[in-house]
Amino acid sequence: LNNTRLGEQVCVGIFPTAEGHQIDFTPSTGTDNSALVDDGPLNPNDADYVSSSVVNHEDYYAYENMPATGIGTINGLRITHGAKLDTAGTRTVQARYYNGSVEYDLGGDFVVDGTTIFEHTSLVDVNPDTGVKWTSVEVDAAEFGMKVTI
Protein backbone atom coordinates (compact mmCIF):
# COMPACT_ATOMS: atom_id res chain seq x y z
CA LEU A 1 0.00 0.00 0.00
CA ASN A 2 1.01 3.58 -0.58
CA ASN A 3 1.51 4.68 3.02
CA THR A 4 4.84 6.46 2.57
CA ARG A 5 5.92 9.41 0.47
CA LEU A 6 6.18 8.30 -3.16
CA GLY A 7 8.17 11.24 -4.46
CA GLU A 8 7.46 12.86 -7.79
CA GLN A 9 4.56 11.21 -9.62
CA VAL A 10 2.76 11.68 -12.94
CA CYS A 11 -1.03 11.66 -13.15
CA VAL A 12 -2.66 10.64 -16.42
CA GLY A 13 -6.36 11.27 -17.07
CA ILE A 14 -8.38 8.80 -19.10
CA PHE A 15 -12.06 9.19 -19.94
CA PRO A 16 -14.98 6.95 -20.93
CA THR A 17 -15.15 6.03 -24.61
CA ALA A 18 -17.85 3.35 -24.74
CA GLU A 19 -20.56 1.68 -22.73
CA GLY A 20 -19.48 -1.31 -20.67
CA HIS A 21 -20.99 -4.72 -19.95
CA GLN A 22 -23.89 -3.35 -17.89
CA ILE A 23 -25.86 -0.16 -18.50
CA ASP A 24 -28.86 0.38 -16.19
CA PHE A 25 -28.90 4.16 -15.85
CA THR A 26 -31.17 6.33 -18.01
CA PRO A 27 -29.47 8.81 -20.38
CA SER A 28 -30.66 12.43 -20.27
CA THR A 29 -30.52 12.47 -24.06
CA GLY A 30 -29.73 10.00 -26.82
CA THR A 31 -28.78 6.38 -26.20
CA ASP A 32 -25.00 6.39 -25.51
CA ASN A 33 -24.48 6.67 -21.76
CA SER A 34 -20.70 6.92 -22.09
CA ALA A 35 -20.99 10.10 -24.19
CA LEU A 36 -22.88 11.73 -21.32
CA VAL A 37 -20.26 11.08 -18.63
CA ASP A 38 -17.02 11.90 -20.43
CA ASP A 39 -16.51 15.35 -18.86
CA GLY A 40 -13.32 15.86 -16.91
CA PRO A 41 -13.52 16.19 -13.12
CA LEU A 42 -12.76 19.91 -13.29
CA ASN A 43 -15.59 20.45 -15.78
CA PRO A 44 -18.71 18.67 -14.50
CA ASN A 45 -21.57 19.22 -16.92
CA ASP A 46 -25.06 18.63 -15.63
CA ALA A 47 -26.64 19.43 -18.99
CA ASP A 48 -25.93 15.85 -20.06
CA TYR A 49 -25.95 13.01 -17.56
CA VAL A 50 -27.17 9.52 -16.70
CA SER A 51 -29.50 8.87 -13.79
CA SER A 52 -31.05 6.18 -11.65
CA SER A 53 -32.78 6.02 -8.28
CA VAL A 54 -33.10 2.24 -8.37
CA VAL A 55 -31.03 0.34 -5.80
CA ASN A 56 -28.50 -2.02 -7.44
CA HIS A 57 -28.60 -0.24 -10.80
CA GLU A 58 -25.09 -0.07 -12.27
CA ASP A 59 -23.44 1.68 -15.22
CA TYR A 60 -20.00 0.59 -16.46
CA TYR A 61 -17.78 2.20 -19.11
CA ALA A 62 -14.75 1.29 -21.18
CA TYR A 63 -12.02 3.94 -21.01
CA GLU A 64 -9.25 5.29 -23.19
CA ASN A 65 -6.04 3.28 -23.11
CA MET A 66 -3.12 4.44 -21.02
CA PRO A 67 -0.35 6.23 -22.95
CA ALA A 68 2.00 3.77 -24.65
CA THR A 69 5.15 5.31 -23.12
CA GLY A 70 6.21 7.13 -19.98
CA ILE A 71 3.95 5.35 -17.49
CA GLY A 72 6.28 3.15 -15.45
CA THR A 73 4.90 1.83 -12.16
CA ILE A 74 1.23 2.60 -11.51
CA ASN A 75 1.09 3.48 -7.81
CA GLY A 76 -2.68 3.80 -7.77
CA LEU A 77 -5.80 4.92 -9.56
CA ARG A 78 -7.92 7.94 -8.76
CA ILE A 79 -11.51 7.23 -9.78
CA THR A 80 -13.70 10.37 -9.78
CA HIS A 81 -17.48 10.38 -10.04
CA GLY A 82 -19.97 13.22 -9.91
CA ALA A 83 -23.44 12.77 -8.47
CA LYS A 84 -26.41 14.83 -7.30
CA LEU A 85 -30.05 14.40 -6.37
CA ASP A 86 -33.04 15.77 -8.27
CA THR A 87 -34.89 16.47 -5.01
CA ALA A 88 -34.03 16.64 -1.32
CA GLY A 89 -33.06 13.35 0.28
CA THR A 90 -30.14 10.97 0.60
CA ARG A 91 -28.79 8.25 -1.64
CA THR A 92 -25.55 6.27 -1.57
CA VAL A 93 -23.50 5.11 -4.52
CA GLN A 94 -20.17 3.36 -4.97
CA ALA A 95 -17.37 3.33 -7.50
CA ARG A 96 -17.06 -0.04 -9.28
CA TYR A 97 -14.47 -1.99 -11.28
CA TYR A 98 -15.12 -4.87 -13.70
CA ASN A 99 -12.22 -7.05 -14.88
CA GLY A 100 -14.13 -8.99 -17.54
CA SER A 101 -15.62 -11.55 -15.17
CA VAL A 102 -15.95 -10.11 -11.64
CA GLU A 103 -17.33 -6.78 -10.36
CA TYR A 104 -15.57 -5.07 -7.41
CA ASP A 105 -16.45 -2.24 -5.03
CA LEU A 106 -13.71 0.42 -5.07
CA GLY A 107 -13.76 1.90 -1.61
CA GLY A 108 -17.26 1.65 -0.16
CA ASP A 109 -20.36 3.78 -0.41
CA PHE A 110 -20.38 7.54 -0.62
CA VAL A 111 -23.34 9.67 0.39
CA VAL A 112 -25.09 11.95 -2.07
CA ASP A 113 -27.34 14.38 -0.22
CA GLY A 114 -27.56 17.55 -2.27
CA THR A 115 -28.98 18.91 -5.50
CA THR A 116 -25.68 20.30 -6.78
CA ILE A 117 -23.00 18.09 -8.31
CA PHE A 118 -20.74 16.53 -5.69
CA GLU A 119 -17.52 14.89 -6.84
CA HIS A 120 -16.23 11.85 -5.02
CA THR A 121 -12.78 10.38 -5.48
CA SER A 122 -11.81 6.79 -4.72
CA LEU A 123 -8.08 6.13 -4.41
CA VAL A 124 -7.25 2.55 -5.32
CA ASP A 125 -3.64 1.52 -4.64
CA VAL A 126 -3.88 -2.08 -5.83
CA ASN A 127 -5.99 -4.04 -8.27
CA PRO A 128 -8.63 -5.75 -6.10
CA ASP A 129 -8.51 -8.77 -8.41
CA THR A 130 -4.78 -9.41 -8.00
CA GLY A 131 -3.91 -7.68 -4.72
CA VAL A 132 -0.87 -6.00 -6.29
CA LYS A 133 -0.22 -2.75 -8.17
CA TRP A 134 -2.13 -2.16 -11.38
CA THR A 135 -0.51 -2.73 -14.76
CA SER A 136 -1.35 -0.63 -17.81
CA VAL A 137 -2.72 -3.78 -19.48
CA GLU A 138 -5.19 -4.23 -16.59
CA VAL A 139 -6.25 -0.59 -16.68
CA ASP A 140 -6.70 -0.72 -20.47
CA ALA A 141 -8.94 -3.80 -20.18
CA ALA A 142 -10.92 -2.50 -17.20
CA GLU A 143 -14.41 -1.08 -17.04
CA PHE A 144 -15.16 1.42 -14.29
CA GLY A 145 -18.56 2.59 -13.20
CA MET A 146 -21.03 3.43 -10.47
CA LYS A 147 -23.68 1.51 -8.54
CA VAL A 148 -26.69 2.84 -6.60
CA THR A 149 -26.57 1.14 -3.18
CA ILE A 150 -29.25 2.93 -1.11
Image (tube, rainbow, N blue to C red):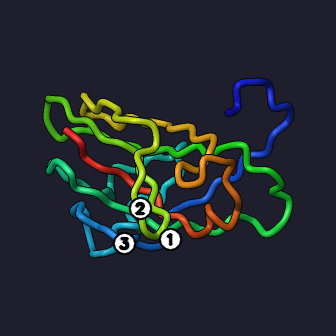
Q: Which residue is mark 3?
A: 21
Query: Relative to the observer, which residue lies in front, 148 or 134?
Result: 134
Residue at the location (34% across, 49% down)? 46
Category of crowding for the residue at label 1, using alpha-carbon neighbours closer than 10 angstroms: few (below 14), some (14–19), many (at least 20) = some
Residue extending furthest toward the front: 130
Q: Name the residue type under label 3.
A: His
Look at the picture and state if 121 lies above or below 58. above
- Gap in angstroms between the C-alphas marked 3 and 1: 13 Å
| Quarter of the rendering containing residue 112 | top left
Look at the picture and state if 22 lies above or below 54. below
Pointer 3 with pointer 1, Cβ within 8 A: no
Q: Which residue is mark 1?
A: 17
Q: Mark 1 or 2 closer to N-term?
A: 1
Q: Which residue is mark 2?
A: 102
Residue extending furthest toward the top: 4
Q: Nearer the viewer, mark 3 or mark 2?
A: 2
- Label 3: element kind: strand
- Label 1: element kind: strand
* Quadrant including the N terminus: top right
| Quarter of the rendering containing residue 86 | top left
Q: Name the residue type under label 1.
A: Thr
- At which x and y percent is residue 143? 48, 63
Query: Relative to the observer, which residue lies in front, 101 or 40?
Result: 101
- At which x and y percent is residue 47? 32, 54
Residue at the location (73% across, 49% down)? 74
- Gap in angstroms between the C-alphas marked 3 and 2: 11 Å
Query: Relative to the observer, which residue lies in front, 33 or 47?
Result: 33
- Label 2: element kind: loop
| Left or right position of 79 against 46 | right
* Quadrant including the C terminus: top left
